[in-house]
Image: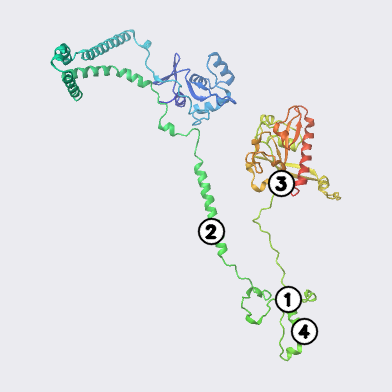
Amino acid sequence: MADPLTLLRQFNINKRDVSEKGDQLIFGEFSYPKNVKTNYMVYKAGEASNKDYYTLEALHFILKNVSIPHPIYVQKAAAAKVPVVNRVDRKALLAYLNGDTDTSASIDKSAPLELGASRSAKRPAEDLDPQDYKKIKTDVMKQENRILQEKSALAAKFDSNKSEPVIGLAVASSGASSLSEAMSVETIAAIKAKRFAKKRSTIQGVPDEELDSVGLESRAFIDSEIDVTRDIISKERVLRNKNNILQSVGRTFTNILSIIQVKSRDSSSRAAQSIASEEKSSKQLPPKSYSRYDQERFRGEKETEEFKIDTLGGFATMKKSSTGGGAAAASGGTVAMHHPHKTPPPQQKTPQHQPHSRVPVPVKPNKSQKRESKTPIIIVPSSLSSLLNLYNVRDFLQDNRFIPAQEKIAQGYRKVSEVMLQRKRDIIQINMLRGHAPATNPNENQVVTIPYRIIDSANRLENKDWDRVVAVFVAGPAWQFKGWPWLTNDNSPVNIFTKMKAFHLKYEETRPDKNVLKWDVTVLNVSQTKRHLDSVSSLKFWEHLDKFVMKNKRHLRF
């Protein structure tokens, strides 16, 4: 049996009328009380545990007045003493009841099941003719009297069977005195035990006539209860079955196929890339063009055998080795060859003596190695209770003005995963801070922009990124640093503050957290009303941060 919300939706989609009879709403052959609660939840901001549900009368009333503006509908509902549907729930509720959406996030599948019982909508007695009503009433009374008589007769039958005395016991009681005189106590006890054992092994039979009469009376009694049983069954409501249990609550799996396709496409592309790389590595390099000055790459290990010929030698080497030996060469003397590992004299390294020497090819850098980032990272709290988070960090650190996060949310700003801050600095100030001489070129750009990456979750960092973290804004509780490196054995973050500069932003009218007073944290104060003093705290932050980076992390951009 469908619940009232589903029945109301089906009747509204099929343009079927829902009739009203007193405090009942009739859906065809079923009817529900008007005040029965559906499983459509009432929106309550910040009260997820205290759930409330719209009544069937409230949903039916808004469907009848869907064409009028909401303020007029509220007035009519108040005049009719009908619960009002909130403006927040109105759009999603009407979309579900009109069939535009298949479900709604406000439908509670696990709602309490005491949502009202349905019953068959029978024809009321006031719609019948008086004569017919009198006749039906007489027949019902006769039938009830006959059922009562049959019940009384059946009960008397069973009572009479129970009250019949046992003949053996009567005889025994009448002659108990004479039996005790004729037999001993042991003999009487043996007879009783034998009779008791025989009684336990036998079953008393019932005559067929009595059995038939009892069966007919029982059948008439059962037939008289069929109408009552049918009425009880009609009031039963199937709350849960196996189909309802197996259905998921508010979850769709339509994107599973797209995820599988993307994964299969990625795996196939990786396999193709691996095959292509293997084929590329297995291919031999094409033969280079012939060059008489590049003969050493054709030299084998045993090319010159025992002659010790230097294939890297040139004309100048040969000339030096044969100096003063021209006559010896002419007379057939041996010419001394230059050893390949000896360094020629400096005067023979001039270009005119080595016109054909090889020029070394510069080694290209490996493109697969990514350039290491030098952008500093600042971590802020993710909690809205903190004065500084991703909603207002750009306004405070870049624009030097503090805007509360709640005000930014009210203006419609959405939270992002990270913020890239652009800090403009004077290059002369940077050179002075680094100890360099100030630039004297008037055409040189005197302002540079330095990026800072702002995040609110340490899970977004890789191991190599922790060296670029220069500052962290402390909210107060120690669980903010759960899972961070450099924690002590008692999960204290004191070692973290030696690796990065810690700050705490608070209102000057409030006291800082007790943990902030124990840790090495720089406290920044802002006023709740004096916005012209925000730049003082912002500049104080940059002053402390520049000193820390200059001392500990000079390799980063700042």
Disc 2 marks which amino acid? Ile
* Quadrant of res 190: top left
Residue 264 left/right relative to 535 = left
Disc 3 marks which amino acid? Thr
Measured in 3D between alpha carbons, the distance from the residue under mark 1 to the one under mark 4, in whole angstroms, is: 17 Å
What quarter of the picture does the N terminus occupy? top left
Measured in 3D between alpha carbons, the distance from the residue under mark 2 to the one under mark 3, in whole angstroms, is: 37 Å
What x and y, as percent, mark residue 481?
65, 38
Whether label 3 touches label 1, CB < 8 Å: no
| Secondary structure type for disc 2 | helix
Query: Residue pushed farthest left?
Result: 182
Q: Residue 275 carries which label?
A: 2
Disc 4 marks which amino acid? Thr
Query: Of callouts 1 and 4, which one flags the residue occurring earlier in the amino acid sequence?
Result: 4
Q: Residues within 10 Å of mark 3 (few under 14, many from 20)?
A: some
Foreground disc of the pair 2, 3: 3
What x and y, as percent, mark residue 41?
52, 25
3 in relation to 363, above or below? above
Query: Of callouts 4 and 2, which one flags the residue occurring earlier in the amino acid sequence?
Result: 2
Residue 57 left/right relative to 513 = left
Task: Give the number of marks.
Answer: 4
Disc 1 marks which amino acid? Lys
Residue ID for mark 1: 342
* Quadrant of res 511: top right
Q: How crowded is mark 1: few (under 14 residues within 10 Å), some or many (20 or more)?
A: few
Residue at 81% of width from left, 48% of height from top?
434
Residue ID for mark 3: 375
| Secondary structure type for disc 3 | loop
Q: How crowded is mark 4: few (under 14 residues within 10 Å), some or many (20 or more)?
A: few
Residue at 33% of width from left, 20% of height from top?
230
200 in relation to 157, above or below? below
